[in-house]
Amino acid sequence: MKRIKTIIILFALYCFTSLSAKVYATEQISDFLTFQGKTYRLYANPLELHPEIKRLKPKLFGTQEMDISTACWRGYIAHWEIVGGELYLTAIHGCDYPNDKIKANLTSLFGSKYINGRLKADWLTTDLIVPKGIVVPYIKASTISVTIPELYFRINNGNIEQVFLVDATKSKINWMYQPNSTMDFLHYDINWKTIPIPKRSVKINIAFSADKDGKIDEIQIAKEEKIDKRYQREAIRAIKRLEPWDVIYMMGKHKRITSHYSITFSAENKKIFNRTW
């Protein structure tokens, strides 16, 4: 049995979407990892790094029919387990797991390498992130999910070399918990009395990020021709009112996360959000 070196480090927040470096409009269903008797969501898809994944995918479920979900573009949900300091693949299910019984035949796929119900992930040399604490819901504003604290595994050819405990003591998350409330706040904060109401609705799309103190110091507005500059100035003022914005740390360093919001100026929104200044 290999010795697992456990290091407790007060890293801050680490965000991870998938090892395949793809970004989807819909948050993807995670794989699962069992470690020390507990099963966690896995912020990675190790099977995607298998050297023969393109050949394997069409054969995963044989003649079994399965619907592909926008939340499962890779086409499967894999289950992993750490045993004796090594990472193993133990099952591959369909995207509707556990509601359906679709399951891959690992013996047929991997032959003699599949031993005693497990396949060692000897192709994998990377770092894996496992959420262990409070999950911040996925939001379209930043296209990520984050969690605090987390487990961080350093893997070399399927062998677990180190395990870090990631503790987000420096991260401060407020607005990301409530994206819908944030949108409402922005519209309620518009000074509707001083802004002309357009005949057609005007949408201002804004991308912004904050420094380590939560000060929003980088703001970009999507360029649109023939838009009254007053709408842009008012949108920027409203965005600045979100300070202090959420502060996120990754591996001990402040990480800028660009968030995207839109503010719509219209007669309808004025009726909904107008308030006495």
Image: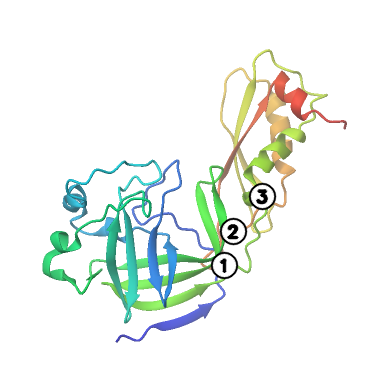
- 233 or 138: nearer the eye? 138
> Label 1, on which residue?
12
Amino acid residing under circle 2: Ile
- Indicate which disc, 3 or 2, sits on the residue closer to the N terminus: 3
State the image coordinates of residue 38 (x, y, percent, origin top left).
44, 72
Q: Is residue 256 in sight in this rendering? A: no
Q: Are marks 2 and 1 in contact (CB under 8 Å)?
A: yes
In this view, the residue farthest toward the top is 199
Distance (Cα) linking label 3 and label 1: 18 Å
Task: State the residue at coordinates (30%, 53%).
Answer: 101
Say which quarter of the image contains residue 259: top right
Can you tell which mark lies on residue 175? Answer: 3
Query: Which quadrant is home to the N terminus?
Result: bottom left
How packed mark 1 is, by other alpha carbons closer than 10 Å (few <14, some 14-19, many 20 or more), is: many
Task: State the residue at coordinates (79%, 26%).
Answer: 192
How packed mark 2 is, by other alpha carbons closer than 10 Å (few <14, some 14-19, many 20 or more), is: many
Q: Secondary structure at mark 1?
A: loop
Distance (Cα) linking label 2 and label 1: 8 Å
Query: Which quadrant is home to the C terminus?
Result: top right
Distance (Cα) linking label 3 and label 2: 12 Å
Can you tell which mark lies on residue 248? Answer: 2
Say which quarter of the image contains residue 230: top right
Q: Is residue 22 in sight in this rendering? A: yes
Vertical arrangement, residue 182 with respect to residue 193, above or below: below
Say which quarter of the image contains residue 179: top right
Q: Secondary structure at mark 2?
A: loop
Amino acid residing under circle 1: Ala
- 15 or 46: nearer the eye? 46
Task: State the residue at coordinates (13%, 60%).
Answer: 108
Q: Are marks 3 and 1 in contact (CB under 8 Å)?
A: no
